[in-house]
Amino acid sequence: MEIEKIKKANTKIIGKEIIYYESIASTQKEAKAKLKENSIKNGTIIIAGNQTGGIGTKGRTWYTNKEENITMTIVLYPKCSIHQLEGITIQIAKAMKDAIKDLYNISLQIKYPNDLLLNGKKIGGILTESATTKGDVTHLLIGIGFNVNQTSFPKEIETIATSLKKEMKKEYTKEDIIIKFIEKLEEEIKVK
């Protein structure tokens, strides 16, 4: 993973700090641990080359193969009320959909509330978690799982999961996707 390349994205806040792990249980859990330590800056992205205990929605597991997909969590400190985050997951999904369209002219579908589909199969998922104090948001965690180059999936999901490579029969660069996504995301959600 070319971390320095990602840091050069045309963003003001998101991705200027990146913490990379070759292998970790969950980027979302790691972000929470760093929040407890007060050791993580606004806009930091935690990226895993391999995620062994990824979290999907409703406590499900997010499966990923080593170095083939995007698994990351973005940490934000939005200065807003919880009501202002209404619809945030769809905005995040739209940023990824727009990024893939701009880069490769591939049209993803958004399945409410937090899935991205390609040809009717799940290619990505978004997990947003926030904490509040007296109605004001103290932090927002944006977990992204996006299948890029994985072509084999566990039996229980092989008929419902896919990746860019599986559908398009070619290899894709994860860094390019992350860069375009965070640029679109910062634009979409008006990060300060």
Image (cartoon, rainbow, N blue to C red):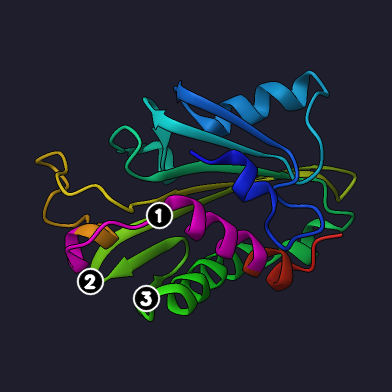
Q: Which residue is drawn at 24% across and 47% down?
A: 150
Residue sitting nearer the eye, 53 or 134: 53
Left or right for 159, reference 41: left
Q: How far apart are marks 1 and 3 (CA)?
A: 21 Å
Q: Which amino acid does label 2 sit on?
A: Gly
Comes first in the chain, label 1 or label 2: 2
Left or right for 71, reference 159: right
Mark 1 lies on residue:
173
Q: Which residue is drawn at 66% across and 28% down?
A: 32
Residue 101 x/y as whole percent = 44, 78
**Residue 143 vertical position relative to residue 82 in the rendered view, above or below:** above
- CB atoms of marks 1 and 3 within 8 Å: no
Which of discs 1 and 3 lies nearer the camera? The answer is 1
Mark 2 lies on residue:
120
User: Residue 109, which numbered label?
Assistant: 3
Residue sitting nearer the eye, 88 or 27: 27
Comes first in the chain, label 1 or label 3: 3
Task: Kindly tell me whether residue 87 is visible in this rendering.
Answer: no
- CB atoms of marks 2 and 3 within 8 Å: yes
**Residue 170 vertical position relative to residue 153 in the rendered view, above or below:** below
Which of discs 1 and 2 lies nearer the camera? The answer is 1
Q: How far apart are marks 1 and 2 (CA)?
A: 23 Å
Residue sitting nearer the eye, 109 or 65: 65
Q: Which amino acid does label 1 sit on?
A: Thr
Q: How far apart are marks 2 and 3 (CA)?
A: 8 Å
The span picked out in magenta is 166-183
Q: Residue 171 magenta-drawn?
A: yes
Please rate how many residues cluster around mark 2, counting C-alpha atoms within 10 Å: few if below 14, some from 14 to 19, many from 20.
few
